[in-house]
Image (cartoon, rainbow, N blue to C red):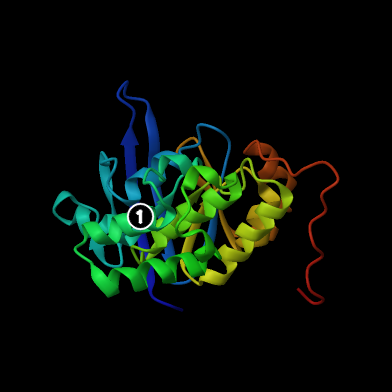
Amino acid sequence: MSQSVLEVTDLCFNYPDGHPALDGVNIHVHQGERVAILGPNGAGKTTLVLHLNGVLTPRSGSVEVSGIPVRKPNLMDIRRRVGIVFQDPDDQLFMPTVREDVAFGPANLGLEGEELEIRVKKALSAVGMEHVANRPPHHLSFGQRRRVAVATVLAMEPDILVFDEPSSNLDPAARRELAEVILGLGLTTLIVTHDLPYALELCPRALVMNAGSIAADGPTTGLLGDPELMRANRLELPTGFSLPNPPAGA
């Protein structure tokens, strides 16, 4: 088994009114895994993600990224290691050109000159967007902007890449193009999504969250093929969607 890059141990967090948002969450993710985080609205998925890079501080429990505790003294390093791609790419794109957006994070780390240029080109190439480096982001399609947003995170060379609803508002071609990018990266990836077919396509493993806890953890096909689990956690596959048949002898 490969090295664990994310360890979440007995994580608990309460909303300001005292209502528990996370209640004893335990997760381990190994290097190179792609894991979907599924669950109904209010399950705690976003709250969990915001603990991974220290935006939120738990009431109890711990998070470690590549063996480094997510604590205040380590936050600069942690936020480089955990890259979050938000649902709306315009939350991440604010510079006059694509190149400047992708360069922004590494430049703040002190990279400059040829080293910075290599980092930018590598990140844009990974998402197939090097040809738009000198264009204003707002001139791009939504799908193109989402891939540029991924490049801004890749330029930081993260250990873990986290996507929040990556397929939302994408047309079928852009959805497929982004899937190809994610599958080609080879990075440890967490995908928070309500798009169950997309989770199945991208993530061999899934976690189901409900009421701030992990309700199930296992192969995505098996979880989505469990009618009782799906019903109990308010998850539904699209009408007419069929799960792939398991391999012979499985």
The residue sitting at 52% across, 49% down in the picture is: 145
Instruction: Identify the secondary structure beneath mark 1.
Output: helix
Residue assigned mark 1 = 100
Q: Is residue 173 visible?
A: yes
The amino acid type of the residue labelled 1 equals Glu
Indicate the position of residue 233 as horizontal and vertical percent values: 62, 38
Identify which residue, 33 or 165, lies in the foreground.
Answer: 165
Q: Is residue 24 visible?
A: no
Q: Is residue 34 above or below residue 49?
A: below
Which residue sits furthest left?
Answer: 73
Q: Is residue 198 above or below residue 249?
A: above
Which residue sits furthest top?
Answer: 17
Indicate the position of residue 205 as horizontal and vertical percent values: 58, 62
Indicate the position of residue 151 as horizontal and vertical percent values: 45, 59
Find residue 99 and report its image quarter: bottom left
Identify which residue, 147 or 195, lies in the foreground.
Answer: 147
The residue sitting at 43% across, 54% down in the picture is: 98
Q: Total label count?
A: 1
Indicate the position of residue 89 as horizontal and vertical percent values: 48, 44
Q: Is residue 134 left or right of residue 77?
A: right
The residue sitting at 41% across, 63% down in the picture is: 154
Q: Is residue 134 left or right of residue 196?
A: left
Q: Is residue 165 above or below residue 78?
A: above
Which part of the image, by quadrant, shows the C terminus?
bottom right
10 Å crowding of disc 1: few (<14), some (14-19), many (20+):
many
Identify which residue, 199 or 25, lies in the foreground.
Answer: 199
Which residue sits furthest front?
Answer: 134
The residue sitting at 22% across, 60% down in the picture is: 77
Q: Is residue 173 left or right of residue 240?
A: left
